[in-house]
Amino acid sequence: MMPAESPFPSIAPRHDLPPRPLRWLFLDLNSYFASVEQQLQPSLRGRPVIVAPVGSDTTVAIAASVEAKRYGITTGTPVWEAKQRCPDLVVTPARHRRYVEFHDAIVAEIWRHIPVTRVCSIDEVACRLLDNENDRDAAMALARRIKAGIRRRVGDCLTSSVGIAPNRLLAKLASDLQKPDGLVVFEDKDLPHALFRLKLTDIAGIGAKMERRLARDGVNDIAQLCARRPRDAGHAWGGTDGDRLWYLLHGVDLPEKPTQSRTIGHSHVLSPGKRGYEPARLTARRLALKAASRLRRKGYRARLLVLHVRFENDKSAWRTSTRLPETQDSFVVLDRLDALFPRLREAGRGRPGGFRLRMIGVTLAEIVPVAGEQASLFAHLDPADPLARETRGLALSRAMDRINQRFGRHAVSLGPLGGGRADRVGSKIAFGRIPELDEFHE
């Protein structure tokens, strides 16, 4: 725990900035998937554990316990390499439904103490502090109550690191500084110099490409970025977001930019024995059905279908697409998907080792909300009429949604599911997106 007194040396305040009280509390659960597995399986507690998507050494860890991280094992470490680093390592399969259930329980516990402003990911939550909560001691006491409540009511293996700061970006950065079970506060008098020990790439939105761009403009660290005038910082960034970042790093709480969902899709890493053309085709069909079901549940139609893959021993992605007639009909989506597979077969022709896919994904893009619906005008057309077929297809797609929700995933499907147990497509948690429990029926 950080002491109550600020550990950062004081500097003269900038008088041209507005007041910057503590406004945000950011909670980051430590080694979340692995911690849930240790909570569910007491025999794993205190042991190095990784969570993997399938039971194969060719896949990668999607989570590592605190104990495994001491061996340098992190998310993305290949399973075979993790086993070499730690002979006592335990590999456990992912159970995404349970992670969503624990997530919901954790969010409910946080609500007992403070309203949740934004769920940022499966293991990250941001809360806006009220005026009676934003003095340093009160905010730290609140954070400790939340952390203790999660351990007591959800699971004692579920520790968290909390950051408190004048804006959400800084609170997120603060939460990353002490892990596991940390608590760090950035006050206005600490800014921006408290950030100078961090790397540019620690800031969300600055990857290797942006880091190189900033370096070409003479910005090699956070101190150099903050030393510029806001407009000059924006120029180095290459747009208006640069001056926005300058103000955020100085503690100004700017309004959030609105976001809008533009795609719905799913991808799947194929097990080594199921990487040929036909297993991949059947997996893609299942992914397309799942995406179309989500599309209907969220009340959208799609105008574009994208098929994307990664071949074995190839770091680059291959993709192709086709237009859709603004639909949410599973039959229409599958029909257009089937038309894309000859292109994929041709792309895989002549590759060393033959047609071998490591990953395949289907995305429905250019989605638009369904503004309103009424009974179809085409229900009494000749059954062979294209409009009548579309009406029947959408009605049947919705009926399948209801059956699968009631009787379980795969109760009904279009065509064979294909693949063995390891290649059955289920809901998985992506960074930044948490599946709704309904998705586990799709």
Image (tube, rainbow, N blue to C red):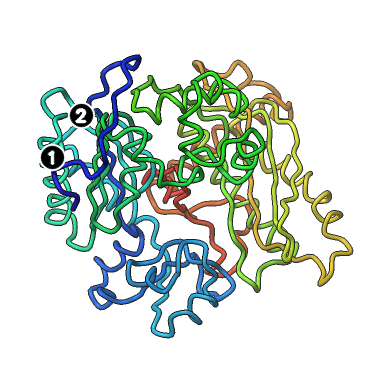
Residue 164: % across, % down: 25, 38
- Three-letter amino acid code at disc 2? Leu
Tag 1's secondary structure?
A: helix
Tell me which numbered mark, 2 or 1, is placed earlier along the sequence.
Answer: 2
Q: Find the residue positioned furthest to the front.
A: 12
Q: Residue, x 47% and y 38% (percent of image)?
A: 222
Q: Which mark is residue 142?
A: 1
Residue 88 appears in which quarter of the rendering? bottom left
CB atoms of marks 2 and 1 within 8 Å:
yes
Residue 164's place in the image compared with 414, above or below, is: above
Figure check: 248 above or below 346: above
- Left of 101 or right of it: where is 169? right
Q: Position of residue 397 (x, y in %)?
A: 55, 38
Percent of width and height locating residue 241: 53, 24
Q: Nearer the viewer, residue 406 or 191?
A: 191
Task: Report the residue marked by disc 2.
Answer: 129
Instruction: Between residue 124 and residue 324, name the one nearer to us.
Output: 124
Q: Amino acid at mark 1?
A: Leu
